[in-house]
Image (cartoon, helix red, strand yellow):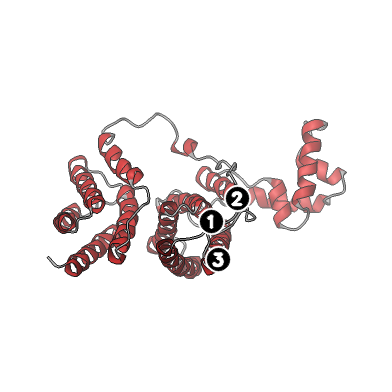
Amino acid sequence: MDKNLILKDLSTNLHRFSTLIAEFCPGETPDLGSLILILEELSITAKQSNSETFFQVINSCLCFVENMTLETMSNTRPLENALILLDALLRHMKKGVEFTFETKDVIDILDSAILTRSAPKPDASPKAAISPPKTDLPEDDKGPDPLSNEDMEILMDFVSEAEENLDSIEVNLIELEQDPEDMEIINNIFRPVHTIKGVAGFLSLKKINQLAHTTENLLDSARSGEFMINDLATDAILESVDMLKKLVGRVKQGLAKGVKPSDHDLDINRLRDKLATLHLRLTQGIKEPLGEILIKKGVIDQKSLDQTLETQKKSKPDKRIGQILVEEHKAKPVQVAQALMEQKTEKSGCPA
């Protein structure tokens, strides 16, 4: 078969595969029969494409879906990860550029999901696995490395798609405010974040990958029905989108100079911690700390809170943080009372 026809066939069936995956909601049983048919067609065409990697990923997907039919599995996340990889592979094939990025992790996820499908789940709360991310991101102080022509093309595609995806997230967040229970809108927000995370991972854009991953975790719990998106979650996601736009902007600046992007001065750790903490609060019903409420209301700043917390730890462990703030004249009694009332009546957004 002609190379252009092979690529066109792969592109068409990959789009069909993507559409089927996108239509699934968490907990629902996918249309496994249609998935298998599409994957079988992709496998036949992939074998003619001379791309061993593409063929291998498709066959791993096929084995995974076949086991889904045997075990009545409904988790399509490994297939979503595979789709990101397959899209990237196909783009490289169309350009005639060798794909030099790591693929083993995606294939291992598919294979391990098959091997462990019948293993008993650990006797522990699923929320216990959620923890704030490590913030010790290594930074290197070497000068910027030049980009090859192939890298430039790949990164230009990434920037273009990432900008479109981030704009779509903002639009969908506005729509979600009108109907917080609309799972289709939540999925429309989740998918572009998931795509950005995956492609950034292949391209070794660590900060984009890690921030998108933390944001994805929050959205995944929302689309699984663990909590309903509220104003706090919306604000945090928008803050993440703003930072992701800055990081993508750095990639764009690097492209203009023909060098790898430099983002060492952009700190994502505080935001990742904020997202992870919010994730815990919304899924476990933990109330917002009094100090954070006072900061949000503009009563105190982070430095004042840190100083008061240190005072509490060292010399006043028996006193509440609100009492100490009043004693230190950093907050008025009425301001602390209002914050306590807000804390007491705060709704986590979890469905009844």
Left or right, residue 319 beside residue 346: right
Q: Residue at x 55, y 58 (%)?
A: 240
Q: Amino acid at mark 1?
A: Asp
Left or right, residue 14 beside residue 287: left
**Mark 3 or 2, nearer chain start:** 2
- Disc 2 target residue: 142
Q: CA distance from mark 3 to mark 2?
A: 20 Å
Q: Quadrant of residue 136?
A: top right
Tag 1 near tag 3, CB within 8 Å? no
Q: Amino acid at mark 3?
A: Gly
Quadrant housing the N terminus: bottom left
- Disc 1 target residue: 145
Left or right, residue 66 beside residue 24: left
Q: Secondary structure at mark 3?
A: helix
Does residue 350 appear in the picture of this structure?
no
121, 88: nearer the viewer: 88
Q: Is residue 178 above or below residue 38?
A: below
Q: Residue 249 shows which numbered tag?
A: 3
Q: Residues within 10 Å of mark 1 (few under 14, many from 20)?
A: few
84, 346: nearer the viewer: 84
Q: Amino acid at mark 2?
A: Lys
Q: Secondary structure at mark 1?
A: loop
